[in-house]
Image (cartoon, rainbow, N blue to C red):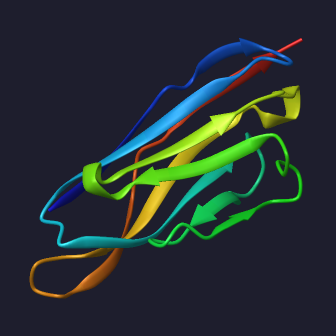
C-alpha cells in the first residue's frame, strides 16, 4: 500500500506565493517520474509540471517562469513552488508518482489533492 499526501494549499492573494509538498509513504522501492496536476471546477484535470527521478523537468506553458517543481528522493517528497499566482491558478492540485514496489511492480499512485485559491 502506497500513500501520497499533499499539503501546503490555501488561500492567497494574486501575486502571492505558495509551496506545495507531496509526501509518499508505504511499500516503496523507488519512485520514477512524479508530477503535479490541477483541476478547476468544470474543467478537466491538467498537467502542471513533471519531474523525472534524475531531475529533468517539464512545465505547462501557463506556469512556465512562475512555478518550480523539485523533489527530494531521499524523503520521497515532491514540491511545487508557486510564485506570482494568478486567479486562474485556483484549483485542486494533485500529485502523482510512478511507484516501483519492493517486488519490482510499477504503478501510478495519486494523492487526494489540496485546494489552492487565489483571490483578487
- Total numbered badges shown on the rendered structure: 0
In-image side of 74 versus 56 (left or right): left
Q: Quadrant of the N terminus?
A: bottom left
In-image side of 36 versus 47 (left or right): left
At horizontal 42% and vertical 65% (from top left) the residue drawn is 97
Depicted 102 relative to depicted 9: above or below: below
- The single residue placed furthest to the bottom in the displayed view is 104
Position in image of residue 87 (x %, y %): 86, 26
Q: Quadrant of residue 58?
A: bottom right
Position in image of residue 41 (x %, y %): 73, 40
At horizontal 46% and vertical 60% (from top left) the residue drawn is 96
Which one is nearer the viewer's eye here, 109 or 32? 32
Position in image of residue 71 (x %, y %): 46, 53
Q: Quadrant of the C terminus?
A: top right
Depicted 53 relative to depicted 5: above or below: below
Position in image of residue 61 (x %, y %): 88, 58
At horizontal 17% and vertical 88% (from top left) the residue drawn is 104
At horizontal 30% and vertical 54% (from top left) the residue drawn is 76
Which one is nearer the viewer's eye here, 41 or 9? 9
Which one is nearer the viewer's eye here, 51 or 74? 74
In-image side of 36 versus 2 (left or right): right
Q: Quadrant of residue 22?
A: top left
Amino acid at each position: 500500500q502506497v500513500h501520497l499526501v499533499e499539503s501546503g494549499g490555501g488561500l492567497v492573494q494574486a501575486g502571492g506565493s505558495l509551496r506545495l509538498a507531496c509526501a509518499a509513504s508505504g511499500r516503496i522501492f523507488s519512485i520514477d517520474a512524479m508530477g503535479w496536476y490541477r483541476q478547476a471546477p468544470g474543467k478537466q484535470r491538467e498537467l502542471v509540471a513533471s519531474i523525472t527521478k534524475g531531475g529533468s523537468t517539464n512545465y505547462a506553458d501557463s506556469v512556465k517562469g512562475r512555478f518550480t517543481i523539485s523533489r527530494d528522493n531521499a524523503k520521497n517528497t515532491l514540491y511545487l513552488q508557486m510564485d506570482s499566482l494568478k486567479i486562474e491558478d485556483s484549483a485542486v492540485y494533485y500529485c502523482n508518482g510512478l511507484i516501483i514496489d519492493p517486488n519490482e511492480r510499477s504503478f501510478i499512485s495519486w494523492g487526494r489533492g489540496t485546494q489552492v485559491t487565489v483571490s483578487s
